[in-house]
Image: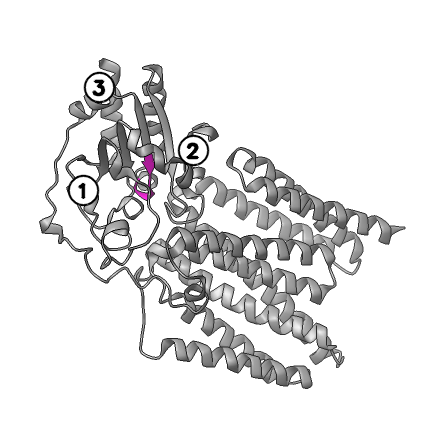
């Protein structure tokens, strides 16, 4: 009877996982999807604890309390600007957990109990160690690049791709030998070491501007690692949940690649994002002549507009300007002005970064419009306000074949009647290239901290 109840619990958890991920695909239902996924995980954990009766529940409760405390602290203390590196850490922990389970299962069965492991079991162990190791070190390199503790640009050396290929083939050969001789612990340690090294080597050549794609890919890796761990533990719900995360992660990675005009094969081979230091787009920084606008004039331009499109970027997150942006939106709408937000798929430092940031300030979901759905509307827009965004509105992606971002789909902000760019300085964006938009005749630069300058603009609008 207990086994039937556990199977039913796993089935319910699996359905909730599938439903939750489906709901996560749309901003209005994302919160509900997250709640259903959390419920699914709770049911799966409880069912597993009931099924495995050799565990010490005191230790389990202690681990739950400690882990919950760490999670609660992170949720309350980590700033929105630090969210991408926290996601990278989570991916790394997922890979490490799969690796640890696989190593402990191998050591218990093969080394301590002298049990000859079946082909399916040993292959699952090898895959969990390999994918988990790559995910762990790769995620922490991504964390280092995002947090600034490592060089954010591309780090390359001669023969890098050849070395990566040799290491992968070496793991395959070692895995084949270990499958034939499951008691060879040396081979397992070699696979572990090479996997950790490979994770490091695959991510260091990827520039910081391309981290949204890397985070998506590493998230997929962590899901695949969890799936293979499910085969080791003979746990159906872990197999299903891992497969869902792996599949959704790789789909999201493909979407990110398309949004940045990159090849998925380049990502998988670790040769991605080497655009950051390739130079200017065609006009040097000194060749771009900009027109600066003040707070009072900005308020007057907004006051005379009928339609406004706001393009948020990572600079908005850094300035923590999302709340004053919401206040600006409310004020403009009270004046009868239409306001919408144009969301580029790779704006920010992780997929959905701008959506999360604006949701924090209670911007209605229906105001957030994806690139493909809003790009044709820029031509009829009176004012486009670009806040801390750079590469995703750079016209060089359309017009300059020499530009490193040429071919990348961008938001058509430059086609608006008036473009106001809120930016601290003329410094290049995260991709390391200059933005041709800043020199366009219809572009005005509002220099200064986004939160401070937009607060002044709101005050001027209120006074008018």
Contact between marks 3 and 2 (CB within 8 A): the answer is no
Q: Which residue is mark 2?
A: 368
Contact between marks 1 and 3 (CB within 8 A): the answer is no
Query: Which is in the foreground here, disc 3 or disc 2?
Result: 2
Query: Which is in the foreground here, disc 1 or disc 3?
Result: 1
Q: CA distance from mark 3 to mark 2?
A: 26 Å
First in sequence, mark 1 or 3: give its number: 1
Q: CA distance from mark 2 to mark 1?
A: 24 Å
Which of the 4 quarters of the picture holds residue 165? bottom left
- Give the residue at x 35% y 15%: 334
Identify the disc placed on residue 460. 3
Identify the disc placed on residue 253. none
Q: Residues within 10 Å of mark 2 (few under 14, many from 20)?
A: many
Q: Position of residue 212 (x, y in %)?
A: 41, 53
The residue segment tinted magenta is 310-315
Q: Residues within 10 Å of mark 1 (few under 14, many from 20)?
A: many
Drawn side of residue 400 relative to residue 102, left or right: left
Residue 320 seen anywhere in this rendered image of the structure:
no
Q: In the rendered structure, does residue 16 fall within the stretch colored magenta?
A: no
């Amino acid at each position: 009877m207990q086994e039937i109840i556990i199977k039913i619990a796993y089935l319910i958890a699996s359905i909730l996982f599938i439903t939750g991920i489906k709901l996560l695909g749309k901003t209005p239902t994302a919160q509900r999807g997250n709640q259903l996924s959390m419920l699914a995980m709770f049911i799966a954990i409880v069912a597993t604890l009931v099924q495995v009766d050799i565990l010490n529940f005191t230790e389990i409760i202690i681990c739950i309390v400690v882990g919950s405390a760490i999670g609660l602290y992170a949720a309350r203390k980590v700033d929105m600007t630090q969210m991408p590196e926290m996601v990278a850490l989570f991916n790394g922990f997922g890979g490490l957990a799969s690796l640890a389970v696989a190593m402990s299962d191998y050591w218990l069965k093969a080394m301590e109990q002298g049990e000859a492991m079946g082909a399916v079991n040993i292959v699952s162990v090898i895959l969990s160690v390999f994918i988990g190791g790559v995910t762990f070190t790769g995620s922490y390199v991504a964390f280092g690049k995002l947090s600034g503790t490592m060089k954010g640009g591309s780090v390359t050396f001669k023969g890098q791709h050849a070395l990566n290929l040799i290491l992968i083939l070496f793991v395959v050969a070692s895995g084949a030998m270990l499958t034939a001789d499951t008691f060879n612990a040396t081979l397992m340690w070699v696979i572990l070491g090479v996997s950790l090294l490979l994770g490091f080597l695959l991510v260091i050549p990827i520039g910081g501007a391309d981290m949204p794609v890397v985070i998506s890919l590493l998230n997929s890796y962590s899901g695949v690692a969890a799936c293979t761990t499910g085969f080791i533990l003979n746990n159906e719900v872990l197999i299903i949940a891992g497969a869902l995360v792996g599949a959704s992660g790789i789909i999201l990675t493909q979407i990110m690649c398309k949004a940045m005009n990159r090849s998925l094969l380049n990502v998988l081979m670790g040769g991605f994002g080497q655009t950051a230091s390739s130079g200017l787009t065609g006009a040097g920084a000194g060749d771009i002549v900009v027109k600066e606008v003040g707070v009072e004039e900005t308020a007057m331009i907004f006051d005379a507009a009928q339609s406004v499109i706001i393009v948020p970027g990572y600079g908005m997150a850094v300035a923590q300007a999302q709340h004053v942006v919401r206040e600006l939106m409310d004020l403009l709408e009270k004046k009868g002005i239409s306001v919408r937000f144009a969301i580029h798929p790779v704006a920010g430092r992780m997929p959905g970064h701008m959506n999360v940031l604006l949701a924090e300030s209670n911007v209605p979901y229906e105001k957030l419009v994806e690139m493909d759905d809003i790009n044709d509307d820029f031509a009829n827009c009176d004012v486009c306000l670009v806040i801390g965004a750079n590469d995703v509105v750079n016209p060089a992606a359309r017009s300059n074949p020499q530009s490193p971002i040429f071919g990348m789909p961008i938001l058509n902000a430059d086609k608006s009647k008036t473009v106001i760019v809120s930016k601290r300085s003329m410094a290049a964006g995260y991709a390391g290239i200059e933005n041709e938009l800043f020199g366009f005749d219809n572009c005005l630069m509002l220099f200064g901290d986004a939160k401070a300058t937009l607060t002044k603009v709101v005050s001027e609008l209120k006074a008018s």
